[in-house]
Image (spheres, rainbow, N blue to C red):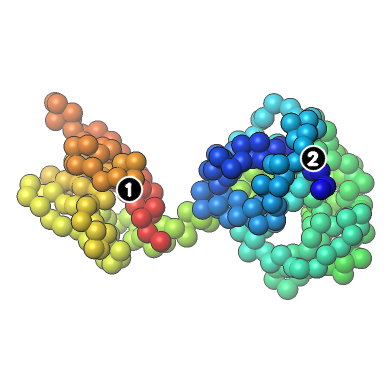
Amino acid sequence: MSHHKFSGFFKEIIEQYPQIDIAGFLSEKLQIPLDKAEELAARIEKEFDLKEIKAEPNLEKTEELETSPKTSVYSVESLSEMELEHFTKWLLEELNYEILPEKYPVDLGVNFVVAKDGEKIAIYVKSYPTTNRAPNSIVLKSSESKRACECQRALVVSSAYFSQQARLDAEALGVELLDRDTLASKIVEVIRKAECEVQSCFPLYKGSLLQSLLGLEETKDFIIEARADEKYDLHLPGVKYPLLTFQSCSGEVVRCVFRIKFNEPVGEFGGEVLIGCDRANNRFGPDGAEAYGLIIQYLEQFVE
């Protein structure tokens, strides 16, 4: 049996496997949506036999990469080189790049090749401690690999910042660079893209919060049942228990309660109150588009 040396998130996953929720762990560590973390977790479990790795001897003595205190909200600096490669593949796929099946020698200066808009791009991934600067040598190697792989472009991905010489050489040779900050911005781009895809199945906010909530019935994903005192229950078709209850007064939503708590239905006064009134009858909670956005975030978990 071959023995593996892991660091970063892989080491934590293996040490806690099989009790760990890998998708939840990645979502929290990398601050990415859960559905995207599930895709990344599936890639990891597909490519590695975690049970076998867990059983290997001396796993507790695995060497760790030198790390420095985290300064980015996205912890790409904690990824080992192998983890960073898998993460980069996932990230580029989410940005509509196609991962091509060609395989190349590791020492060629290319980890994999992608395609977009009719161009082939050689991707070179290198992980460094945050105290280091990615050297110009990897830029030069990437430029050579672009020609060897018959690619039109070359892209170097690093978990650290690039040295000044590396940036100068990249500009001269036409090599694109992704450092830790650029990776973070790309992650934000993926998150916003995912949020837009999810929210596109909901009507946009229009007029008022009350009008927008009543308009959810137009999606055919929900049924709104009117009750006394201008109260409304929002249901999924065929489901007895409501997902939320809201109440209006003079055209304004004065109460909104989420009725699913810990994956179980609860009564109107046992749910999570998003909008309500205090004892002095003063309204509290968000309103308008802000409230509608929070309600959509809650409802999207029930819509496939």
Residue assigned mark 1: 295
- The front one of 188 and 206 is 188
Residue assigned mark 2: 5
Q: Is label 1 in contact with label 2 (beta carbons under 8 Å)?
A: no
Q: Residue at x 22, y 52 (%)?
A: 241
Dot 1 amino acid type: Ile
**From what the image shows, is residue 114 above or below residue 288?**
below
Viewer can see residue 102: yes
Q: Residue at x 87, y 67 (%)?
A: 149
Q: Is residue 289 left or right of residue 37?
A: left
Dot 2 amino acid type: Lys
Residue 222 at x, y = what percent? Answer: 27, 61
What mark, if any, has residue 230 been given in the picture? none
Q: Quick one: label 1 or label 2, which is nearer the N terminus?
A: 2
Q: Residue at x 47, y 57 (%)?
A: 196
Q: How many marks?
A: 2
Residue 40 at x, y = what percent? Answer: 61, 52
Asked which quadrant contains residue 259, the reply is top left
Q: Residue at x 66, y 52 (%)?
A: 44
